[in-house]
Amino acid sequence: MSLAVLGSSSLRLSSPLESHSGRLRATRQKARDASKYSYRAPRAVMPDWAQVRVDTPAAEKVLHFNNAGSALPTQQVTKAQHAYLELEASTGGYEALTQEAEAMEKPYTALAQLLNCHPDEIAITTSSTTSWFQVFGGLKLKAGDRILTSISEYGSNFLAYLQAIKRQQVEVEIIPEDAEGDVNLEALEKLVAAGTSKPALIAITHIPTSSGRVYTHAAAVGAIAQREGIPYLLDATQSIGQMPIDVQQLQCDYLTSTGRKFLRAPRGTGLLYASRAAMARAEPATVDVHGAVWTTRHDYQLVPSAKRYELYEMSYAAKMGLGVAAEYVLKIGIEAIWERVQHIAGMLRQLLQELKEVTVQDRGRLLCGIVSFTMEGKKPEDVKQALREKNINVSISPANSTLLDFSQRGLTQVLRASVHYYNTEEEVHRFIEALKTL
């Protein structure tokens, strides 16, 4: 078994790496604002946030700051699910699918528009982890192959690495972070160049489950991976639906995410982007008769799209809801959503910083809608339960969700308050007042 961890470095990035896109420079400017826990008032012209609240009836019943766990759905999503279930009940499952075949293409077309790719590069699965395993398990890893991953890699992904170490004798190397908590690109370049062969995979988590940090260097990592011909797998579970994601700009071969978080889609839905080039190089971990055609006794042919990564059986009512949820994001506008999320989260961080017993644990150039914090002298579970009694939802991120990051920072648990565009300034103030009573 081999697990190598390279020491952290604070070396500055070289000009060629920093200048790979003007968009990245703009993102870094936003990051400097966010890292100071500052926030700016939203633009004058914005979507109708009051209507968004109307579309989210539960938002008037509960203060939901657990969007990184499972967001409140719109009534459009739940109505679409219920209508499809009624159709199945009244006509039969296969017959309902045939009748709604055109509507079942909505998740592919809407998500492709959201991610800037072709619909045939999108697969619909049951979770982000299922998507991720379909990619990782399909790689032909062998003894001595090197996997480069991040300090903040999600626990389920890292467990797969540990299994690969045991089963295939691969090596896992950790990409250090720079002084601001982003991927250290110079260290990554050294890791890529080290060893007798190129790494078999670069896989990182764009936003960790336990922190508001965004890896702004994700696109630069993609540029390095593409230059070197290394497969690049990006876990964007906490990204899709709260911020703009462009797979062309990121230059990732694969991207995975879930429906239930910031997309506000039903539980039991996930998605996978697989580029056409990547599909030509590797197969899914497993296929069924939905993703491949059994042609002879000794052979099969994969379908010519990312649907090869899908398995036939899933909740088609949930899949219908996923399409509606993705279209809703497009209707509101992802740029407006991202600005709103940063505004609400920035306001929350600033007010939390003013509470002497609270420590905000987020760090990084660019911060998102996940706000992680601890309270001196209080157990996270006690705080969560006390807030729940006030009809306020938060969650807890334990160490085993991002063990390397937590171990490095001396953390065992953090409270996680994750906001979304349907949340309000009034809810932020109500949340702070509730914390003051604990």
Image (cartoon, rainbow, N blue to C red):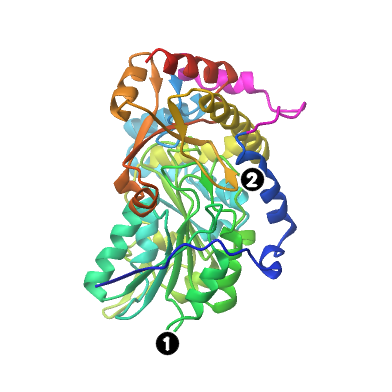
- Which residue matches tag 2? 31
Q: Is mark 2 on a helix, strand or loop?
A: helix
Q: In which quarter of the image is residue 286?
A: bottom left
Q: Which of 355 and 279 is in front in this view?
A: 355
33 sits left or right of 364 in the view: right
Q: What element carries label 1?
A: loop
Residue 220 location, x and y as percent?
Answer: 61, 64
**Magenta span has 296?**
no
Residue 313 location, x and y as percent?
Answer: 31, 50
Q: Which of 428 and 294 is in front in this view?
A: 428
Q: In which quarter of the image is residue 87?
A: top left
Residue ID at (36%, 61%): 134
Residue ID at (28%, 58%): 159
Q: Which of 88 and 420 is in front in this view?
A: 420
427 sits left or right of 343 in the view: left
Looking at the picture, which amino acid does disc 2 mark?
Ala
- Which residue matches tag 1? 196
Label annotation for residue 291: none
Q: Which of 345 and 90 is in front in this view?
A: 345
**Magenta span has 55?**
yes
Q: Mark 2 or 1 closer to N-term?
A: 2
User: For the magenta stretch, what is the residue range?
Assistant: 38-60
